[in-house]
Image (cartoon, rainbow, N blue to C red):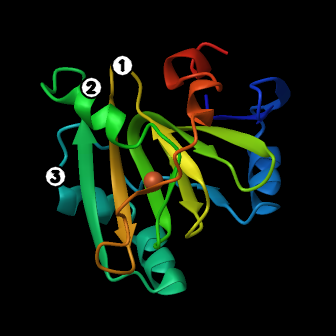
Amino acid sequence: MSLLAVYDELGNLLELTRDYEEIKNRLASIGVVFERWQANKELDFSAGQEEVLSAYRDDVERIVKEFDFKSIDVVSLTPDHPKKEELRNMFLSEHTHSDFEVRFFVDGSGTFYLHPDDKVYVVLCEKGDFISVPANTRHWFDMGTQPFFKAIRFFSIPDGWVANFTGSDISTRIPSHDQIVRL
Ligand SMILES: [Fe+2]
């Protein structure tokens, strides 16, 4: 189940909620959009990009219009991927992007860590969750040691997803995705 856990910068847990409205409102207070979407049909994990986008057409069109996104794609990762560790490590350290980081979880899960102020907002995103991390917000993402997810990604500027690492080691002080799913 999706959750929001708020930690201080030393890794002490301050808040924990699994209530959708609470997660949405708490994240809105730091400029992060969090929504839950419903597919208009059942989707297999094997569903292709067109089928996925069609199942969420209304929400996808609304969001594309609202944020003026220029491109969308659908990515998926499973625990049998030979480069899963490399892929996990790519975004496991704190960084920023010049574009929004906007994801919708079609299946599986992943954890976003947002560090907009002196707290870290940990959002375990699961099937049906939409999250938008504002541009230039310090954050990282953990897909776990056994990554399993399918997500729609939205882009507004070319190369806006390139990570600018802050050099901070804060991500080592906050529980990993594998630990968060067991909370
Ligand atoms: Fe990122």
Residue 19 lies left or right of residue 59; in this view the side is right
Q: Earlier in the sequence, mark 1 or mark 3?
A: 3
Residue 69 visible in the picture: yes
Please name the amino acid that badge 2 sits on. Answer: Glu
- Which residue is label 1 attached to? 145
Q: Are marks 3 and 2 in contact (CB under 8 Å)?
A: no
Distance between mark 3 and mark 2 Cα atoms: 24 Å
Residue 146 lies left or right of residue 95; in this view the side is left
Residue 44 visible in the picture: no
Residue drawn at 81 percent across, 47 percent down: 118
Q: Are marks 1 and 2 in contact (CB under 8 Å)?
A: yes
Say few, some or many: other residues with alpha carbon within 10 Å of mark 1 (under 14 / 14 to 19 / 20 or more).
some
Say few, some or many: other residues with alpha carbon within 10 Å of mark 3 (under 14 / 14 to 19 / 20 or more).
few
Please name the amino acid that badge 3 sits on. Answer: Gly
The quarter of the image holding the N terminus is: top right
- Which residue is label 2 attached to? 85
Residue 75 position within the rendered picture, expressed as x and y whole percent measured from the top left: 25, 50
- Which residue is label 3 attached to? 48
Residue drawn at 44 percent across, 79 percent down: 64
In the structure shown, which secondary structural element does the residue marked by tag 3 occupy? loop
Residue 18 position within the rendered picture, expressed as x and y whole percent measured from the top left: 74, 32
Residue 176, label in figure: none
Distance between mark 1 and mark 3 Cα atoms: 25 Å
